[in-house]
Image (cartoon, grey):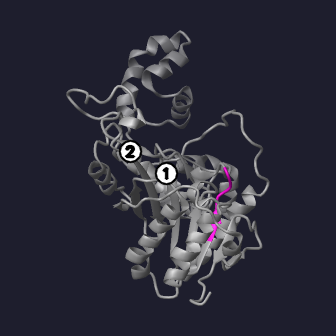
Amino acid sequence: MSELRQQEPADLTKDIRQLGGRHESSEESSLTSTTRRARRQYGAQRYRIRRPGGGRKLIEEIDPAIVPALERLLADEIAGDPMTEQKWIRSSLRMLSKQLADGGHRASHATVARLLKDMGFSLKANKRKQGRVGCPERDHQFKYIASQKQRFITAGWPIISIDTKKKELIGEFRNNGRTWRRHAEEVNEHDFPGVAKWRAVPFGIYDVGKNEGYVYVGISNDTPEFVVCSIAQWWQDEGCRVYPIGSELLILADSGGGNGCRARAWKLNLQVKLCDTFGLTATVCHYPAGCSKWNPVEHRLFSYISMNWQGKPLKTLEIMLGYIRGTSTATGLKVKAFLDRGVYKRGQKVKSEDFERLKTEPHAVCPKWNYTLHPRKVQE
């Protein structure tokens, strides 16, 4: 609505203004009393309309580099909800404003807040719940992960983020969400695992540098062997073909599950099935317990898969694989999906002598979360 059209309702409320109803008049015309007073003081002509594009320009128009600069600051701060597109950041607005100023980009904290909102971030409050005391090494680990990522990016080496998605029952089962239909699709009244055709275990690999996802859907158990076999298959089919010879691999993982930092079977399988088999050096950085939402695979891959099949029953494994392969984003995310029919038994035992022969190099920083596995020679 132009300023002239906004002024027209004010003519109808002249009597209200004369009776002292400035507030009511402002609401009627959508012009504040401050704006009206400024017009009277500076003698603005009543029927003038501001030229399109007039007024103070947005900071991103004056300084186009500010948005990429803000994105770089947030690259290691982002967390997200795997089931939605909501994102959070850990730095305060004023701290981000100061960091931008240090980089030559002037923006107030209010401007930073607007930019974050335009970029899809939201302000979240703390939610009180019973839980463990936070780990004092948490922030130190986040900074170390950021430094390792930068080292691998500079070298042109691959960085993958891994995790196992929620297990899915295959059959006539309800899937959360809604779809556009004339009639609701009928499914089983109860979600009893015993009547499912399969219990699918989707293991995801997100290539951070190439913005590509790979999902290996197992029908057995979520074990360290299954996880490492999936990584080894990815390296054989994709990684070794697109990355230069002599590259090292950085794996970002949670601290629990089949790739837990304390799981002996995880390190043994990683040594034997990946490092020794392909002559590959692999560095592993674990996120602290309770910090899985910071893992890129959660909000850059799993979230979009969940949104793609929401409200649609996963009646067969082929349908599930189809929805995974059909997942894409405006930023160019591409996803491949594969079915793994292998049988992986739980409770793999690792003998002490076998574990001691692993060629593991703990890092000086948080060695329980950061370590490198080197390939062993054949005779070892």
Q: Is residue 262 left or right of residue 63?
A: right
Q: Which residue is mark 1?
A: 119
Quadrant of image for the N terminus: top left
Residue 22 vertical placement versus 201 (above, below): above
Q: Nearer the viewer, mark 1 or mark 2?
A: 2
Asked whether 99 or 340 is in front, the reply is 340
Q: Where on the picture, by quarter, is residue 215?
A: bottom left
Q: Residues within 10 Å of mark 1 (few under 14, many from 20)?
A: few
Residue at 32%, 29% (x, y): give it.
188
Q: CA distance from mark 1 to mark 2?
A: 19 Å
Residue 177 vertical placement versus 232 (above, below): above
Q: Is residue 288 magenta?
A: yes
Residue 311 vertical placement versus 234 (above, below): above
Horizontal and vertical percent position of residue 270: 56, 71
Horizontal and vertical percent position of residue 189: 35, 25
Residue at 69%, 64% (x, y): give it.
369
* Highlighted range, magenta: 284-289
Q: Is residue 338 left or right of residue 162?
A: left
Horizontal and vertical percent position of residue 13: 43, 15
Instruction: Say whether disc 1 or disc 2 marks the residue closer to the N-terminus.
Output: 1
Horizontal and vertical percent position of residue 240: 43, 81
Q: Which mark is residue 307?
A: 2
